[in-house]
Amino acid sequence: MRKCFPLGVPLVERTHPLTSVPGRFFRPSHVRFYVSQLGTTLMLDVLNRSIDEPIRTGLTWDQSWRGPDSGLIRCWERGRELSKLQPALSERGKRGELVLLPWKGGVESKLADEKKGSLQYLAMWQGLRGEDLVVPLSQGTHRVCSRTGQVVVFSQDHFLPVSSEK
């Protein structure tokens, strides 16, 4: 069975790997989000998840990182966990600082130009701040570090961990 996404992109029916529920429709390439009982919603290429949703447990590595959200929900959940382990870091994030995290996007000092950051950083930072997950997938977004004034542009073009940055 085939249906069309509002933009005319064909969708195929598959069983969702996290819920084993048949009847979900996915874009065949670059699947990033889905509508499910897990609380993730599709809104014009924006991945949303409420802070009221519990942190998922019992998922395999593949389910966490290679699912339709490409690990963005896991990054956000890890940020929520980190906020409990490091409350001082969480407070800095809540003040608007783009603190250093494992993904590209944190700021130590102001650079001459805008910095590029990953959506994984943005998701983890939102979790650290105790916010709902709201990640725009189709277009970039930016944040300004409240401590340094550095502008960081987040997009899916920049999804490398900090250790891969050159």
Image: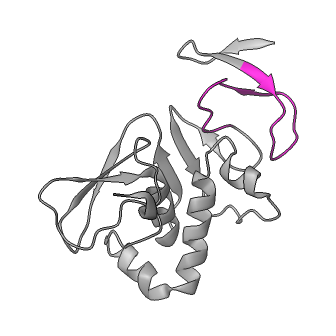
Asked whether, in this view, residue 102 is left or right of residue 85, the answer is: left
Asked whether, in this view, residue 136 is left or right of residue 37, the answer is: left
Give the answer, above or below, for where 9 lies relative to 74.
above
Q: Position of residue 62 (x, y in %)?
A: 74, 51
Q: Position of residue 2 (x, y in %)?
A: 75, 12
Residue drawn 38% across and 36% down?
Answer: 139
Residue 16 makes an appearance in the image? yes
Residue 51 makes an appearance in the image? no
User: Which is more toward the observer, 104 or 18?
Assistant: 104
Colouring used for the render = one colour
Residue drawn 32% across and 75% down?
Answer: 95
* Quadrant in the picture for residue 52: bottom right
Residue drawn 38% across and 74% down?
Answer: 93
Which part of the image, by quadrant, shows the C terminus?
bottom left
Judge whether residue 31 is colored magenta: yes
Residue drawn 51% across and 34% down?
Answer: 45
* Quadrant in the picture for residue 35: top right
Which part of the image, by quadrant, shows the N terminus?
top right
Asked whether, in this view, residue 74 is left or right of residue 157, the answer is: right
State the extent of the magenta-drawn residues as a range: 12-34
User: Which is more toward the observer, 62 or 148?
Assistant: 62
Q: Quick one: which residue is furthest to the front in this view?
A: 166
Q: What is the magenta segment's predominant secondary structure? A: loop
Q: Quick one: which residue is furthest to the left in this view?
A: 112
Give the answer, above or below, for where 116 lies relative to 85.
above
Q: Position of residue 90 (x, y in %)?
A: 45, 79
